[in-house]
Image (cartoon, rainbow, N blue to C red):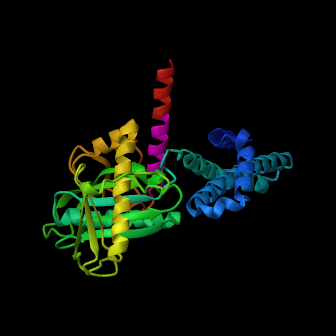
Amino acid sequence: MRAETQNTVEAIEKSLELLRQRMDWDTASHRLEEFNARVEDPSLWDDPDNAQKLMRERQALVDAMKSYETMAQDLSDNVELIELGEMEDDIEVVKEAETALSTLKSRAEAAEIEALLNGEADANDTFLEINSGAGGTESCDWAAMLARMYVRWAEKKGYKVELQSETSGEEAGIKSASYKISGHNAYGWLKSESGVHRLVRISPYDSAARRHTSFCSVWVYPVVDDNIEIEVNPADIRIDTYRSSGAGGQHVNTTDSAVRITHAPTGIVVTSSEKSQHQNRDIAMKALKSRLYQMELDRRTADINAAHEAKGDAGWGNQIRSYVLQPYQMVKDLRTGVETSDTQGVLNGDLDRFMAATLAQDVSGKSRAEATAED
């Protein structure tokens, strides 16, 4: 077996071993039996919300076990094919198996990253907010580009995207937008995107074709599960209804049904302007509870807290990622050093490489901290 192929095999074996450990493989079958026993209980659906949660957890375990077993079998089969091909000098069989192993390596690495998403709220749906920074039309246009980028990313993941509210820019783009993104591990994937995003380009709005730098802030926080109790004192909130404004179109509702909730103790303001007043009130209240829940996570989790403190104002010194379109093409994450010249791919939603690197860095950082504490 060629050295390069052997390295690929070892990388796959490492990923599978990490998957096995994070899945607690030795107890997986027992846990599945417990899930199956609970699913067969006739009283399960007396509490539909809890039943659905249980079914999701069971399916996630089934999918994880099946994925691991399939990849382990594929590894064994292709190693065997290479050995047989080399014994019989069948170059085509060897090449075909090596190509399959290369594909399997990517699958195993992706599964390993998914396994990192085991935080308290990682599996939850998420809210994503985008706000333009100083810079007028330039920043508003950049905010619209970021919104398109995240919607494209979510659609590629098969997630459901719902626009919660949007404020249009005076000339172009958007001043702000809020989305709810629903799907397994939506928050886990997107949480690393909180921070300031910087764009450098030749402005299409500058008649002198000068280079401009624009900033936008992105904030991601989890949708609170129904079984997580977040108490909100009615005396602490103010609920206002208003007529939403904007350029019109399918995403902007121009009736008086928009709802704004202000939480006095924290200063948190949430809005929803897409549905009826009653629905908007429910959506805005869930968003408020999610924000309060995120604050609690920030207090308990130093890494998340540090990320939000680092976000700061949408300007110099606080950015987590730079998108340079002129004089050269590059997107670089300033936390991990991951970069690419495929700027259009990134702006079309190819973000997994950046998210995965941040997730891996967070886990390795925690591991070092834990090891230091143990020493």
Q: Which residues are magenta?
A: 351-364
Residue shown at 60%/50% (left/top)? 111
For image coordinates 21% across by 49% down, the residue present is 313
Given residues 174 and 269, the one toward you in this image is 269
Q: Dividing the image into 4 quarters, which one contains the N terminus?
A: top right
Quarter location, residue 208: bottom left
The location of residue 114, given as percent across then percent down, is 56, 50
Front position in the image: 46 or 25: 46
Please give the name of the residue rendered at 49% of the width and 41% of the height, measured from the top-left corner. Answer: 360
Percent of width and height locating residue 110 = 57, 51
Q: Is residue 159 left or right of residue 250?
A: right
Would residue 271 be visible to someone looking at this image? yes
Q: How many marks?
A: 0
Q: Residue furthest left?
A: 208
On screen, residue 333 versus residue 356, left or right, reads: left
Residue 181 falls in which quadrant of the image?
A: bottom left
Question: As drawn, which residue projects farthest toward the top?
Answer: 375
Identify whether 140 is placed above or below 225. below
Q: Relative to 61, does residue 168 appear above or below in the rendering? A: below
**Residue sitting at the far right:** 88
Kindly indicate the quadrant of the structure image that contains residue 348. bottom left
Q: Position of residue 300 (x, y in %)?
A: 40, 38
Verify whether residue 222 appears in magenta: no
| Residue 203: image location, x then y, percent | 20, 65
Q: Visible in this render: residue 332?
A: no
Lateral position of residue 127 relative to residue 273, left or right: right
Using the image as rendered, state which of residue 218 and residue 88 is in the foreground: 218
Magenta part mainly helix, strand or loop?
helix
